[in-house]
Amino acid sequence: MLFRKRRARLEARTRQAAVTGYVGVDGRAPVSEAGRQLLRKAFPDHWSFLLGEIALYSFIVLVLTGTYLTLFFDPSMSEVTYRGSHVPLQGLQVTKAYESTLHISFEVRGGLLIRQMHHWAALVFVAAIGVHLLRVFFTGAFRRPRELNWMVGVTLFLLALLEGFGGYSLPDDLLSGIGLRTANTIVLSLPLASTYLSSFIWGGPFPGHVLIPRLYVVHVLFVPGLLIALISAHILLVVHLKHTQWSAPGKTDRNVVGQPMFPHFTAKSSGLFLMVFGVITALSGLAQINPVWAYGPYRADQSSTGSQPDWYVGFLEGALRLMPRWENTVAGHTVMWNVLLPAVVLPALLFLVLYLYPYVEKWVTGDPREHHLCDRPRDRPTRTGLGVAALFFYAVLLTAAGNDVIAAGFRMSVEALTWIFRVAVVVGPVLAFLVTKRVCLALQAHDRRLLEEGEETGRVSQNVSGGISDSHRPIDATRRYRLLVRDIPRPLPHPGERAPRRHRLRARLSGWYYRDRVDMPATTEEHREIAGRTLDPIAGREEE
């Protein structure tokens, strides 16, 4: 009885202290107001919106495992004699960075599991951001007012590539050393400032003695700080701008429909975090990755056969292998076009296109409105075709990064395979664009037939004269709504031959983007309702 009274008094004091503390904080900061708004926020329930959460949760795993690894990793390039528990390497001269990596793998309790979790989480993080960007691109979720958030996402992807390459290079094993040698070659291909920049980064001739410590600071401090800042900004913009949503009854460009944060989203998101953590842990325990002890320490005069970078930078390796040998001497300086173009100009152009695409499509469309409904990829065949063509281009370059391994496995000539990839990287994206556009238009035609004839029931009937026909039933109202409510711009009219060249170019591009389409059969009343559902939110508020 005495213990119960003491516990009750303790609980009452704790409760009173919590209330007092909350009132004190709320009086100095808008805690209650922010909490009410956050708890009322509507979160999407479609599976495709979970891709961003997977990226966030894999980043949390990265931070947790990376913090543990920093307790044991020594980012030094000073050489020591290895005397650890891995017998095949005993007696070799290795750097302290490589020695500490082996120490983590073989002598720290749970070290190998944490190391592999960190590596697998990095791969999942980059992949989730990439697929999330694809989802945003193909559904048009980058349009006004989300252009800034798209640029933040592209920057996150770029920083994730840099962070992944930095972590991949820190162990100073033979495989990562080959990657750093490639990076040094890329830096040396830059005109004019190449040797100065290389000497600054590596502290002298390659491999130098300062790169790993500098890379360690960038990997654990600078880039993670930027990632945390940009992820926070990205989430704040999502909360402020609200999420996009798929066309369905009750969902328009002027409202947001979803599940509340508590308890629905909180429970689902917590479960997803545990699933991501569990899958990464299972992969790390069952699938070996980056066995640095098998590669050995880095030696500038050695190279391992079949060495491949991680997939996210593999396209650069493929571009380097496909580029013909091409050098020029200009004013006493050698310009290595065979390295500069594929490893510097190509990625710079790719990211420039990603940054500018929302504004290019907005200029071509001539549409200043806000958009909150997702596009179905089939309804924007040109945009979808461009996206698939870019994916095909990337896939060819990534496959070409292993042309030596493929040639050895299939007993082919490396030169012949390289020429096949060179043709494929030029012709393949064009064919992929044309085929994808045709498929999208065919799917639109299929949607039109569903609206006109309905869906097949599977029953076949025969009339008295012997004719056979199948029966159809009208599609349900939800599906009909999804097929009809879509926002596809009309091509801009031609301004005339006397108009400025940029206006004529804009009209031609607009016709190329939106000329090919399949119109859906709808009544006048349905057309009026569709126009209301896709009305500009700002114009709608003004009318109200």
Image: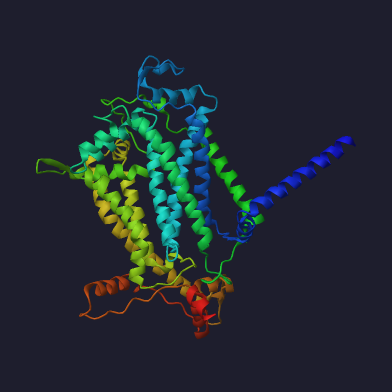
For residue 273, above or below residue 215 = below
Q: Is residue 404 left or right of residue 544?
A: left
User: Which percent across, then down, holds residue 260?
Assistant: 63, 60
Instruction: Give the residue at x 24% y 81%.
Output: 496
Q: Is residue 42 left or right of 3 when viewed as pictured?
A: left
Q: For the C terminus, give its image quadrant.
A: bottom right
Quarter of the figure with residue 307: top left
Front residue (pair 73, 178) = 73
Q: Give the number of marks.
A: 0
Residue drawn at x 68%, y 50% is: 22
The residue located at (62%, 52%) in the rendering is: 268
Of the pair 105 and 156, the residue shown nearer to us: 156
**Which quarter of the rendered picture does the N terminus lie within?**
top right
Where is residue 370 shown, x and y percent of the image? 45, 70
Front residue of 270 and 1: 1
Instruction: In this rendered view, identify the residue nearer to me: 68 or 476.
Output: 68
On the image, the x and y values in percent for residue 408 come to 30, 35
**Seen from this angle, which residue lies furthest left?**
331
Q: Residue at x 47, y 80 (%)?
A: 521
**Is residue 318 left or right of 478 when viewed as pictured?**
left
Above or below for 105 versus 518: above
The residue most toward the bottom is 524
Q: Is residue 177 visible?
A: yes
Q: Position of residue 132 (x, y in %)?
A: 46, 54
